[in-house]
């Protein structure tokens, strides 16, 4: 016992800046990830504001078409690789050790490194704005040959940044797998694990499978651009469509990398505020695993118009439709969890319930775009833009915000301002629908995506969408205030601030200490806090 | 403040513009059997989704209203039911199979281009479309109309703004047409919603699609794959005409082609070459090299004082004809005629401050091909 005390006091945090640079503590690194993701969210959001300002009315008013393409490209890249993914790694870092009764991540030094690569990768990516020829302008999907032969020199910096982001993600994933497998409390069986841990474990395998493929794609781009190869150039025997196959073999699992941990978060919040155990724990686990498996075999549904043979199109259509089944299971399980519960609607629950509504709308439009012949009309229009923003903003981002309010008391030991948080929720949920719902109409009426200017019949919905966009954008000012206000002036929170909350993290002190679970939790405690009751 | 007033001003402008803009909420039904099949599928899947949404969301909303702690609800403790899980795995599978059957038959139909009566070759260029009628020997480039180009930076927008071109594609009605779609540079996508045709144009490969158009009229579409700076400015306009009108149009094009051939045999004056060259330059070259020849640093080279435009004229001709490998500079051999190429080279060498003063004749181009 004395050795443990000595160990703890020796490892109290350093003071000042060096604490953050040298830290190997999962909570510090989790916070770093979350703050980094938040800053990137604001930068990517600012770009979205520029896009919506230019699209406010027909004609080019503020920026030129080349810069518009830079905005859409960098908005996508930053939101995917800079905001959503790091935010989930941050949540994983903070929560997984506490949820499995581990003192820290399995590979703490690598953990430090995987975070500190990110600011450099992000910096390199953003620095391309100041280079001759400007930032990447070929869309976040960077299809060759627009991104090879036809792209400015700054593209090589983009490639390097993607490599760094990939290293960071792969290391993060290895760390999570190693932690869940090796650091889990001895008494905790796999089927005792909380859903957030399960979804992150499965996500990690997706990351390890998908990110090297992305690295391969950008490496081939690099050699095509600089060393005379012709992977994607028909003139040299290559094939530009092969780029899309490689990209989407990464890209589709990537979609689920961004949504599976979100499923995990929602599976914690809903049972808590319904005061009822999660319905169908094991079917949730199996559904997550099936979605992960399916995500590897549906990639070409992004490519129905590339000239694939009919047999290929049929296969990818059928496989894609199958995804609706496990996803439906999840939605039905959440609703069954609410059914005959005793619900209250604190802020995290508001975000979670609206997640179920809005993510499901994104799921419906997902089924629609999965129908290959109909996708001929939907493909590359605003209908697709609306679809993936419903799943990524009101899906992935919604769950991150829900998680922030849900676990903020555990991270800070303090309560946020509930009234303000509710105002923020309603502000965001209304404006986000004003922003994205009209984009369905725009797409169906025939507005292609990624265009800086449009013809007159698209004017009204674009203006409505822009107004929603500005309102949604400003809601993040309030969000920032609420979080900082909580950290500075929040009232002390209870160890278990939510009446119905289950999970080992709530057995810790109101503000989780720098090192938790130096002594693993007992079997009894694990059973008692398990979601699989 | 000035920005605010300009915004308010444009807001009023927009509202007045709306007088002739249509409110489109839904996908077009279109004018081909394929587009109607797609529309039918779209509406079917849509209503299935709406039905599921009504059922699922009603249950959820009921629960949100009734099963509240403030309503005195006491939490039940059930958390598992294999029966329920099987039910909501099985029912969606049945619904999906029912949707997959019509989707498959439509897909198989629209991919079958074997029954075509005529063929059009469509080539995407940054940022224009080239249309070839291989059998009729007709070929032309279709650019965004100058009207629309002028309106981009002005307050006044007219009907069909950004959806009008200088040379419309002309097709006969009630004829099965096969489109062979390819690209000369990056990936484009030829999309006319009313035909239900949207197909990637891949450089180095040829894709196909087909349409049999039922109604005479003018149909508009746009490029639907990000292809660089002016992706938003390469629309498609198709005039569908009666078979008789189509035959007349073909004849007229063939006569015009012969006339052009005669033009290219004569010796041109420098003045005529330069004025034609300016026109050709503004349509074909200015989107990259700029109206004033300044290009875009780091992306597209300037022509002002460039080593090509102020160097050996043979090299200049070679680059325009054959393009520059590994760059965005395309080969114009098959895009422009001898006269146009001669004119644009002559123009480039004596404009933007370039003072070469030399000129090149159409027959020089012919022999350089």
Image: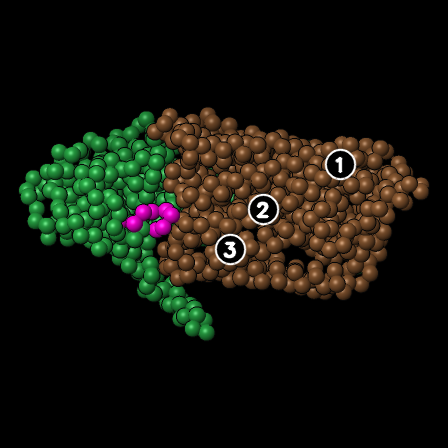
Chain colours: A brown, B green
Earlier sequence position, callout 2 versus callout 1:
1
Q: Is residue A271 left or right of residue A370?
A: right
Whether residue B186 is visible, yes or no, is yes
- The correct choice, above or below, for A458 with respect to B5 in the image is above
Residue at (50% x, 43% y) in the render: A158
Q: Which chain does the residue under circle 1 lie in?
A: A
Q: Nearer the viewer, mark 2 or mark 1?
A: 2
Q: What residue would you read off at disc 1?
A: A106
Q: What residue would you read off at disc 2?
A: A120
Label 2 crowd (10 A; few <14 / some 14-19 / many >=20):
some
Alpha carbons under labels 2 and 3: distance apart: 20 Å
Q: Looking at the picture, how far across and down is residue A48, in whole percent?
A: 51, 55
- Tell which residue pokes out farthest to the right in this image: A1
Q: Are marks 2 and 1 on the same chain?
A: yes
Label 3 crowd (10 A; few <14 / some 14-19 / many >=20):
many
Q: Is residue A523 left or right of residue B71?
A: right
Question: In what quadrant of the picture does the C terminus of chain A appear?
Answer: top right
Earlier sequence position, callout 1 versus callout 3:
3
Q: Nearer the viewer, residue A300 or B4?
A: B4
Alpha carbons under labels 1 and 3: distance apart: 37 Å
Question: In what quadrant of the picture does the N terminus of chain A appear?
Answer: top right
Secondary structure of the residue carrying numbered label 2: helix
Residue A47's label in the rendered image is 3
Q: Looking at the picture, how far across and down is residue B241, in whole percent?
A: 23, 43
Q: How many marks?
A: 3
Quick check: is B301 in the magenta stretch? yes
Q: Which chain does the residue under circle 3 lie in?
A: A
């Amino acid at each position: 016992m004395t050795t443990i005390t000595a160990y703890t006091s020796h490892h109290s945090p350093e003071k000042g800046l060096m604490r953050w640079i040298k830290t190997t503590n999962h909570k510090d690194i989790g916070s770093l990830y979350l703050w980094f993701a938040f800053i990137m969210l604001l930068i990517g959001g600012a770009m979205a504001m520029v896009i919506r300002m230019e699209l406010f009315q027909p004609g080019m008013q503020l920026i030129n078409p080349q810069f518009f393409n830079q905005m859409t490209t960098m908005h996508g890249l930053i939101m995917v690789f800079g905001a959503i993914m790091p935010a989930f790694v941050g949540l994983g870092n903070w929560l997984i050790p506490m949820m499995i009764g581990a003192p820290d991540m399995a590979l703490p030094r690598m953990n430090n490194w995987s975070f500190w690569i990110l600011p450099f990768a992000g910096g390199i990516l953003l620095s391309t704005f100041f280079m001759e020829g400007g930032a990447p302008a070929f869309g976040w999907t960077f299809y060759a040959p627009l991104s090879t032969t036809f792209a400015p020199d700054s593209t090589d910096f983009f490639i390097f940044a993607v490599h760094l982001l990939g290293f960071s993600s792969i290391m993060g994933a290895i760390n999570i797998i190693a932690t869940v497998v090796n650091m889990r409390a001895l008494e905790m069986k796999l089927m005792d694990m909380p859903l957030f841990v399960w979804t992150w474990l499965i996500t990690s395998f997706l990351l390890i499978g998908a990110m090297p493929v992305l690295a391969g794609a950008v490496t081939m781009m690099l050699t095509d651009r600089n060393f005379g190869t012709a992977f994607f150039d028909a003139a040299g025997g290559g094939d530009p469509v092969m780029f899309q196959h490689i990209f989407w073999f990464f890209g589709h699992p990537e979609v689920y990398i961004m949504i599976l941990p979100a499923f995990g978060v929602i599976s914690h919040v809903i049972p808590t505020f319904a005061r009822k155990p999660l319905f169908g724990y094991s079917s949730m686990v199996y559904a997550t695993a099936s979605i992960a498996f399916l995500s590897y075999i549906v990639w070409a549904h992004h490519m129905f118009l590339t000239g694939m043979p009919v047999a290929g199109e049929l296969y990818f259509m059928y496989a894609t439709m199958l995804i609706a089944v496990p996803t439906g299971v999840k939605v039905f399980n959440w609703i069954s969890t609410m059914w005959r519960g005793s619900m209250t609607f604190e802020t995290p629950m508001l975000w979670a319930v609206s997640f179920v509504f809005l993510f499901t709308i994104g799921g419906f439009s997902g089924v629609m775009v999965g129908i290959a012949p109909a996708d001929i009309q939907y493909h590359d229009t605003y209908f697709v833009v609306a679809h993936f923003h419903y799943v990524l903003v009101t899906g992935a981002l919604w769950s991150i915000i829900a998680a922030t309010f849900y676990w903020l008391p555990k991270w800070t030991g303090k309560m946020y301002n509930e009234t303000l948080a509710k105002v923020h929720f309603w502000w965001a949920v209304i404006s986000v629908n004003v922003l994205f719902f009209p984009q369905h109409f725009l797409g169906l009426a025939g507005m292609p995506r990624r265009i800086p200017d449009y013809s007159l019949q698209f004017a009204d919905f674009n203006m409505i969408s822009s107004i929603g966009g500005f309102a949604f954008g400003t809601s993040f000012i309030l969000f920032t205030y609420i979080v900082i206000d909580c950290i500075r002036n929040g009232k002390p929170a209870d160890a278990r601030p939510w009446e119905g909350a289950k999970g080992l993290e709530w057995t810790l002190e109101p503000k989780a200490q720098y090192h938790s679970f130096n002594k693993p939790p007992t079997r009894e405690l694990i059973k008692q806090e398990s979601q699989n009751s | 403040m000035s920005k605010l007033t300009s915004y308010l001003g444009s807001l009023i402008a927009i509202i007045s513009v709306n007088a002739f803009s249509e409110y489109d909420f839904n996908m077009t039904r279109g004018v081909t059997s394929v587009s109607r099949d797609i529309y039918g599928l779209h509406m079917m899947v849509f209503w299935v989704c709406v039905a599921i949404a009504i059922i699922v969301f009603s249950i959820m909303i009921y629960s949100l209203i009734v099963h509240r702690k403030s309503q005195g609800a006491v939490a039940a403790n059930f958390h598992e039911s294999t029966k329920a899980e099987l039910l909501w795995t099985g029912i969606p599978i049945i619904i999906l199979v029912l949707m997959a059957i019509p989707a498959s038959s439509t897909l198989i139909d629209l991919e079958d281009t074997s029954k075509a009566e005529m063929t059009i070759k469509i080539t995407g260029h940054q940022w224009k479309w080239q249309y070839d009628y291989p059998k009729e020997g007709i070929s032309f480039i279709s650019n965004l109309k100058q009207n629309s180009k002028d309106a981009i930076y002005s307050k006044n927008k007219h009907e069909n703004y950004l959806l009008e071109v200088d040379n419309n594609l002309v097709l006969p009605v009630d004829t099965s047409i096969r489109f062979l779609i390819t690209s000369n540079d990056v990936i484009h996508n030829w999309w006319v919603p009313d035909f239900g045709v949207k197909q990637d144009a891949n450089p180095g490969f040829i894709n196909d699609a087909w349409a049999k158009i039922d109604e005479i009229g003018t149909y508009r579409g746009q490029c639907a794959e990000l292809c660089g700076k002016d992706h938003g400015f390469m629309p498609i306009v198709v005039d569908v005409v009666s078979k008789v009108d189509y035959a007349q149009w073909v004849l007229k094009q063939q006569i015009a082609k012969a006339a052009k051939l005669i033009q290219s045999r004569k010796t041109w004056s420098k003045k005529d070459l330069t004025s034609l060259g300016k026109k050709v330059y503004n349509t074909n070259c200015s989107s990259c090299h700029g109206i004033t020849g300044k290009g875009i640093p780091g992306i597209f080279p300037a022509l002002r004082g460039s080593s090509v435009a102020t160097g050996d004229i043979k090299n200049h001709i070679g680059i325009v004809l054959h393009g520059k490998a590994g760059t965005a500079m395309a080969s114009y051999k098959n895009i422009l005629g001898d006269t146009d190429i001669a004119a644009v080279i002559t123009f480039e060498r004596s404009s933007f401050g370039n003072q070469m003063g030399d000129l090149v004749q159409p027959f020089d181009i012919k022999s350089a091909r």
